[in-house]
Image (cartoon, rainbow, N blue to C red):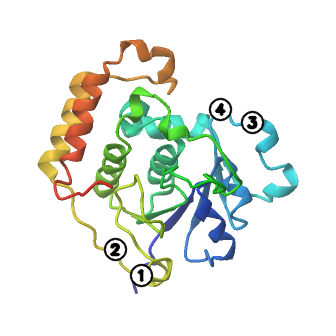
Amino acid sequence: MKTALNKVLIVGSAPDAIKTADWDTSCFSHTVVINNAWKACPSWSCLIYPEDFPIDRRPGDDALCGRRIVTAQEFVPVQNEFGGFVYAGGTMSFTAGYWALGALKPDVIAYVGCDMVYETQPGESTHFYGLGTADPLRPDVTLQSLEAKSLRLQALAHQNGCSVVNLSERKKSRLCFPRLALTTLATLTQRPHVETPSPCAVESALNAESDLGYWVESGRYWEEQDRFDRQKLRDIDALWLATAPGLALA
């Protein structure tokens, strides 16, 4: 008898996050919501947020009901196991992915509401709750290529026996994960087949990171960002992009 796949759902705050309110998430062992997304997804089991997430936006005690809150005290050590924030990318979509990978040991991580695309027409919203800040697009030395950071997560997940997919139906995404329908994922009994990153290219990127040595154990990399060379980090991004040579970026 085959053991059921350990599937983890990660929900961000893009407009399509609201769809999860109507989803049957029983196929997931954990539903991880980022920042405000707990308001969009009633079935959440884990809420992850950074140190500066406003207290008045956090759920009250009556909304917790045994659910798990994940703070920097937990996610920083886990992300450090995967190389730290400078290389992983300092935005919560990736932080949630690495925390889930290390702490929950999933077979599949499925994203929704995390496309990090903020192009809108007049009257449209950037987030499910209205207009919000495009945090991943801030001028941060660790976020020069969101595509490269997503490929890094995908490669390290693959090394740990996990596939990463995107359940979004939006046309554009900065995540380079393969698309999958919720209905398909719900019935899977084996990990979805995804293109395997080039092992040699992955090794080259990881070696370059190690050689550069941009390590901040506290996770508060912004306190030391003056010592980080943007071009050298762009060069490493290029190595991660090379792990998927057939990728057509939107």
Q: Distance between the residues labelled 4 and 1?
A: 36 Å
Residue type at mark 2 is: Pro
Number of the label disc, if any, that sits on residue 51:
4
**Numbered disc 3: secondary structure:** loop
Q: Answer with left or right where residue 237 lies relative to residue 228.
A: left
Residue at which label 3 appears: 54
**Foreground label between 3 and 2:** 3
Check disc 2 and report the residue beneath it: 192
Work out how far the residue at label 1 is from the one at label 3, CA to CA, in angstroms. 38 Å
First in sequence, mark 1 or 3: give its number.
Answer: 3
Which residue is rendered at x = 15% and y = 51% of the image?
Answer: 199
Of residue 87 and residue 45, the one placed in the foreground of this image is 87
Query: Can you tell which of label 4 and label 3 is closer to the viewer?
Result: 3
Rendered image: mark on residue 1: none
> Marks 1 and 2, Cα distance to the nearest angstrom?
7 Å
Is residue 127 or residue 148 the one in the foreground?
127
- Categorize mark 4 by other alpha carbons within 10 Å: few (<14), some (14-19), many (20+): few
Q: Mark 1 points at which residue?
A: 188
Query: Which residue is at the front of the view, 91 or 186?
Result: 91
* Residue 239 % position (x, y): 20, 40
The answer to whether mark 1 and mark 2 are in CB contact below 8 A is yes
* Tag 3: amino acid: Pro
Q: In this view, does 52 lie above or below 18?
A: above
Residue drawn where x is 34% and y is 40% of the image: 145
